[in-house]
Amino acid sequence: MSEQQVLPADGHPLPAVASRVAERQISLRFVRILVGVLLVAFATFAIFASIDGLSTDMRIALSVFAATLIAWTVMDLPETPVALAGALALVLAGAVGEQALFSALGSEIVVLMLAAFVIGAVLKQTGLAERFAFRMLAPFQTVQGIFWATTGAIFLSAFLVPSTSARAAILMPIFLSLSAAIGRPAVTRALALLFPSAILLSAAASLTGAGAHLVAADAVRRVSGQSVDFATWAMLSAPFALLSSLIACGLILYMFLNGEDRQAQAAHGPGAAFSHRDKTILAVVGATVALWATGGLHGIGLPIVALVGALVVASESISGITFKAALKGVEWNLLLFLAATLVIGEALLETGAAKLVVDRVMAAFQGSVAPAPWILIAFAAIVSALAHIVITSRTARATVLIPALALPLAGLGVNPAAMILVVTLGSGFCQTLMVSAKPVTLFGGMEPPAFSAVDLLWLSALLFVPFVALLGAFAIFAWPLVGIPL
């Protein structure tokens, strides 16, 4: 019998069904691209023909920014090629010089992330991150204790591995081992929800936890003159990251598990002992993080410390991993994307386009009562927390939200540094849909599926309000105590 004659239960030929599905997908994609092209044309026309008082460079910068935003959201095009195309368009149009692009590729931010990726690759390839996590979890025997300890271990990993997707790949074996040791379907589902949620929320703790944080730190320096180093970022964001991760853990424990499941015993054994090589690697990584945190005392830049740490830890005599092998773990796609978005952000700031937007927002509210600062903070937190639904890249969200949301709202009477932090940390909420973030896709795409899209949506709905409230509380009450007044 030929393939065309094989019929499923509903009596329709399988190839014909697949063909119709593919045709619908192609049609939908064509419509999205067509609508996106029309929106880009309309936005460009409006910027060049309908807005007065802009220089040519301002118009170009705003047009490229609008085009990249539409390409990411409406057309659903890949983030990195779009960002690179936008950066090249700015250079070719003369809005920024060629040196701006080359400087971004070799900027301190990109070098820092490159070195941090090398360190993370060594931790992954040696299996040290996995053994370290199991040692932390070994004393905990009940499901409830394991969940809290797992959240703490994932939180600490944010200071070591500079990518949420890399941490998800490193931690996947731990999830599989715990799931097998406990052997309860409900606990497996809850664990599968916990891992990506804690990975994404805890990333806020570290300056190198996501490329978006480096974009935000650079924007704070440019706009307010305040320097945000590794220690400062941790002081501002680590408590928020830990509390939000613990809230997610508590919600998962008490909304997805019953009392019997929470008190169930796990049959996992004690973690493996660390070898001499493991201890050496941990010492080097610990020293690197310590030097990052004390940069204000010794004056050595974060990228230099990171490069030295990467060269040492990726030495065959130290870790057994060559530098060449460690480089294979670098997410070059993210580095290029980060560099390109830096160029787009710099164009908005250097041409004065971002300042002009802020000035015009302020002029629109002149003579009227501006909203209270806490209302502006709440609005920024809500919008940034929902932005992942239309912009899936965390760095892209920061690149878009800082000039389009944070700075205009700051112009209404809020400290720009506080508003930039709010929209950046708010954009770390990204676990509503299976495609919202790579860790969610990784844990949700297992066979058989560990959790459903409905489970994910339910968790996101439960977590949204406490997340936004916590972020607002930090901006209003906590950050003013450490130098970021509202």
Image (tube, rainbow, N blue to C red):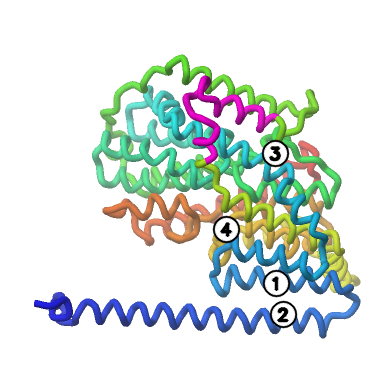
- The image shows residue 128, relative to residue 9, as above or below, that is above
Label 1 sits on what residue type? Ala
Would you say residue 240 is visible in this rendering? no
Given the image, on which type of amino acid does mark 4 rest? Ser
**Mark 2 lies on residue:** 43
For label 3, count other residues whose C-alpha is less than 10 Å away and answer few (under 14), some (14-19) or many (20+).
many
Q: Earlier in the sequence, mark 2 or mark 3?
A: 2
Where is residue 399? Give x, y as percent.
69, 58
Mark 2 is surrounded, within 10 Å at the Cα level, by few (under 14), some (14 to 19) or many (20 or more) other residues, namely some
Q: Nearer the viewer, residue 484 or 228?
A: 228
Q: CA distance from mark 2 to mark 4?
A: 22 Å
Going by the picture, which residue comes out furthest to the top?
Answer: 276
Q: What residue would you read off at disc 4? A: 393
* Pointers 3 and 1 in contact (C-beta within 8 Å): no
Q: Position of residue 432 (x, y in %)?
A: 48, 59
Q: Which residue is labeled 3 in the image?
A: 233
How packed mark 1 is, by other alpha carbons closer than 10 Å (few <14, some 14-19, many 20 or more), is some
Sequence-earlier tag: 2 or 4? 2
Locate residue 368: give its quadrant: bottom right
CB atoms at circles 2 and 1 under 8 Å apart?
Answer: yes
Q: Is residue 37 above or below residue 423?
A: below
Q: Which residue is mark 1?
A: 66
The magenta segment is 305-327
Please say whether residue 326 is one of the residues in the magenta stretch.
yes
Ranked by sequence position, the earlier of labels 4 and 1 is 1
Q: Secondary structure at mark 3?
A: helix
Say which amino acid is labelled 2. Answer: Ala
